[in-house]
Amino acid sequence: MSVLSKIQLEKYADALIWGLTTARSTGFKKYDNVLLRCDLEARELGEIVYRKLVQRKYNVIFNFLPTPTLERDFYQYSDDKQRGLLGAWDKELYNNLNGYVFIHAPASLTHLKGIDTKRQSQVAIARKPLFRIRDEREEKGKFSWTLCTYPTTELAKQAKLSIKEYAAQIAKACYLNEPDPAKKWGQIYKDTVAIKKWINGLGIASIRTESASMDFEVTLGERRKFLGVSGHNIPSFEIFTSPDWRGTRGTYYANLPAFRGGNYVEKIKLEFKDGRAVKVSASAGEDYVKKIMATDPGASQLGEYSLTDKRFSKIDRFMADTLFDENHGGKHGNCHVAIGNSYTDTFTGNPARLTKEIKAKLGYNDSAVHWDLINTEDKKVTATLKSGKKVTLYEGGQFKY
């Protein structure tokens, strides 16, 4: 039996479809192709989303994700050729997709513990062309995506919450107790426009983030803009950009723990010099962090910088799930960065016209990795403008516009 009520599940599905359709600049039309994927534990929500998509006359491709046993067996018993496979059918599917909905509901967060990280990296590298296809189609207005998390016993356990408490956090964060969550998300979408307009109009050269544990600077880069609350994630409150990775310097500290690839990591500290992480440490999972950051040259460079305003986010507990943790509101809001791949839709021009060479020239990072690392400490964020003037962007967990 679901820990979310039937009414809440219907509203959750409506919010997801709001996200999917809002995220696509050109809008959807009848018989567009939408891929819907979910874990088995989220079957009930997946079935509702499927029904609503079909009712909209979309062509829906539905599939369940591998169980923990299937996933572990693949990584444990496959060979290099199997892990490096990218079938022609995968490219055919992605070249014709108009939308993608992912419902995350893990039955285990630790089932890949002990599996060689290199094996996971081989799969990530092999599947990288699919993400490039997605990005290119999205840049042309032909594709959009959204995702959410469904409460599971495993998530609640790792977050040290009861399943009822965990589900209540999701309901609160996604406005499932509101009469019309999709309408509420539409209002938040409008409210954050003012923040993005303010930041993008400042003429920022660099951004410095200071807290008890870090002093960290990024160079914004040429032709950059801040994005956020686009419909891509439910929930999402972050305002983010992809800076010029070459201008990253100083110390970044992630005080929130994380689960990734079956591994638990805690208190990651990265020291950057000339754009690259030259020193990496963690109180738990340090060896795993170092291996992930050695996946490819871009894995030790910055792909994203983000801030979340506590006035929007109602998330105030560790959720053992990146989607919720990167949108943490709480007492101090949060800052998070991602090592690895950049988001080229942060380009002020037409992203579809960005060649590989232009992306490199602008300092957009390229990697098979994209890993969000979250800091929820009280912090001050100061922007140095191109004019030399300094402006406080964020303090006390909120933007200072």
Image: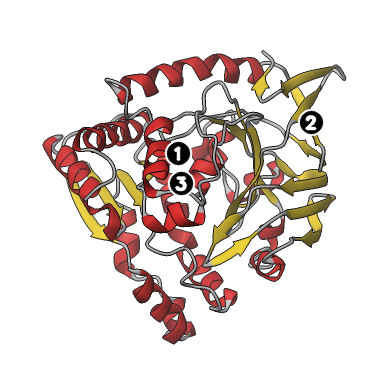
Q: Secondary structure at mark 2?
A: strand
Q: Quadrant of residue 130?
A: bottom left
Q: Would you say residue 175 is visible in this rendering?
A: yes
Q: Would you say residue 58 is visible in this rendering?
A: no
Rendered position, 119 above or below 394: below
For label 2, count other residues whose C-alpha is less than 10 Å away and answer few (under 14), some (14-19) or many (20+).
many
Q: Which residue is mark 2?
A: 206
Q: CA distance from mark 2 to mark 3?
A: 26 Å
Q: Measuring 66% from the left and 29% from the top, which residue is drawn there?
A: 332
Asked if the residues shown at circle 1 and circle 3 are in contact, with their CB atoms under 8 angstroms apart, the answer is: yes
Q: Quadrant of residue 383?
A: top right
* Picture coordinates of residue 26, whole percent (x, y): 33, 29
Q: What's under tag 3, amino acid-wise?
A: Asp
Residue 135 got which mark?
A: 3
Q: Measuring 34% from the left and 49% from the top, which residue is drawn there?
A: 103
Q: What's under tag 1, amino acid-wise?
A: Glu
Q: Measuring 49% from the left and 41% from the top, which residue is drawn there?
A: 324
Front disc: 2 or 3: 2
Rendered position, 158 above or below 337: below
Q: Which residue is mark 1?
A: 139
Q: Secondary structure at mark 1?
A: helix
Q: Measuring 49% from the left and 73% from the top, which residue is drawn there?
A: 112
Q: CA distance from mark 1 to mark 2?
A: 26 Å
Quadrant position of the C terminus in the picture: top right
Q: CA distance from mark 1 to mark 3?
A: 6 Å
Query: Which is nearer the N-term, disc 2 or disc 3?
Result: 3
